[in-house]
Image (cartoon, helix red, strand yellow):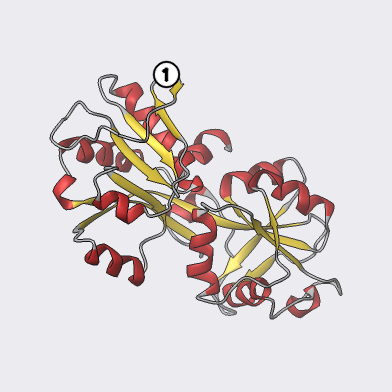
Amino acid sequence: MLKARGLTIRCLFLITFLTAPILSWGNDNAPLQIRGSKYMFFAMTDLARAYMQRNPDKSVVVDESDHEALKDLSDKKYDAIAMLGKLDEDAQEEAEDLGLRLVEQIVGWGAVTLVTHPKNPVTELTLEQVRRIFSGEYNNWNQVGGDDELITTMTRDESVSGTELFFSQSVLRGFPFAQKTVRVFDHDIVRKIWKQPGSVADSRYTEAIRGRINGFVKIIAIKNDENSPAVMPTPETIQSQAYPLAAPMTLYFNSSNYGDNSKRFVSFCSSRGLLNPMASRRDH
């Protein structure tokens, strides 16, 4: 069942009808409707707001949901779907089965960050160490050079999490999260980490930066392998992809629906050169 939050962005946010959306198919003045996970909802909302401030005659609707996204794209309920990362092979096969000919457009860069308690002496991890920690293979920080302290893994308790999906695909590589992984609401992650010294969580970049500035969390640098340099997430390392957990913010359109309205929005997003609009404007 679709759970979506729709916001039409002009100077103010207005609630929109999702039951019978008016798409931009063949109508250059109709709202461009985009749906995605929570990570992409906030990122695309910022981009859409900026786009409409520059183009007051245009309208972009961003909805938060990723349930049956490809089917809704096929059914013409939306003009585009937005995700952190790219569609995996299963999703590409699903798109083919639905008769979709997808147009893939990267409109920015985001990242998953790892946060832990400020007193945790561990400052860097390899991708393999991260996988072993979050899959439950490692359960003590002394297995990665830290103190003799049990590891508590945390992730968000959300049905629509682009961050978790990307993390599962790129880091866990098919392994499930450890059974003891604590599920917490997104806005509680920083507070939970602060209260539990042995904890570690995957977090959105902007939340991690805010938490670090306030002294509640420490960001862990990531290495591709033992012989690689440890890289901290920054606007520069994310956009250059030097940071191992950088990910493209991707829009997918059905080719039959990729018209001038969509192309103008994609061109605007790409020209800004942002890794994440919120991060660039609010965190630096």
277 sits to left or right of 229: left
144 sits to left or right of 126: right
180 sits to left or right of 9: right
Can residue 243 be seen in this snapshot? no
Give the residue furthest to the right. Answer: 148
Q: Nearer the viewer, residue 125 or 260?
A: 260
For label 1, the SS is: loop
Tell me the residue at 76%/80% (across/down).
Answer: 143
Tell me the residue at 72%/78% (across/down).
Answer: 138
Q: Position of residue 85 (x, y in %)?
A: 41, 59
244 sits to left or right of 252: right
Q: Nearer the viewer, residue 4 or 171?
A: 4
Can residue 39 be seen in this snapshot? yes
Tell me the residue at 60%/74% (across/down).
Answer: 131
Q: Position of residue 3 (x, y in %)?
A: 48, 44
Q: Position of residue 31 (x, y in %)?
A: 27, 30
Q: Amino acid at mark 1?
A: Cys
Q: Residues within 10 Å of mark 1 (few under 14, many from 20)?
A: few
Tell me the residue at 38%/44% (across/down).
Answer: 35
Residue indicated by mark 1: 11
